[in-house]
Image (tube, grey):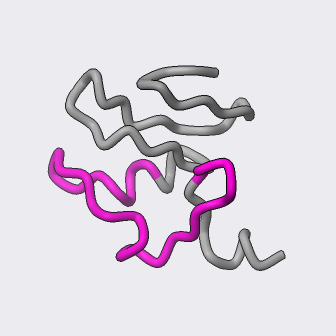
Amino acid sequence: MWCCEREWVGPDRAHCCARTGGCGHVFDDAELWDTHRRRGVCMDPGELGLMQTRNGIWLRALDHAG
């Protein structure tokens, strides 16, 4: 998929679209997207303990370690 000059692969990915006021990050799943978006405001994924892959997908740290 492609949006906001970001590209990713995977049917379960969740993109926080910059065109609609989001941060532009791509998350491993919708639950992580929900976690980063509190009361309509994007939180920094790194401050939430998430890790980013080389492709720019934010994952749970335990998922990234395996």
Residue at 54%, 48% in the rendered image = 27
Residue at 38%, 38% in the rendered image = 24
Taking the magenta stretch, the answer to whether it contains residue 16 is no
Give x and y (percent) for residue 51: 57, 70
Query: Which range of residues does the magenta coloring cover?
Result: 33-57
Left or right: 31 with respect to 41?
Answer: right
Residue at 51%, 43% in the rendered image = 26
Give x and y (percent) for residue 59: 61, 62
Q: Pick whichever, 61 or 35, lies toward us.
A: 61
Left or right: 18 with respect to 57?
Answer: left
Give x and y (percent) for residue 48: 39, 74
Residue at 49%, 56% in the rendered image = 32
Q: Examine the rendered structure and indicate whether residue 31 appears above or below residue 14.
A: below
Q: In the rendered image, which quarter contains the C terminus?
A: bottom right
Q: In the rendered image, which quarter contains the N terminus?
A: top right
Number of numbered tags placed on the structure image = 0
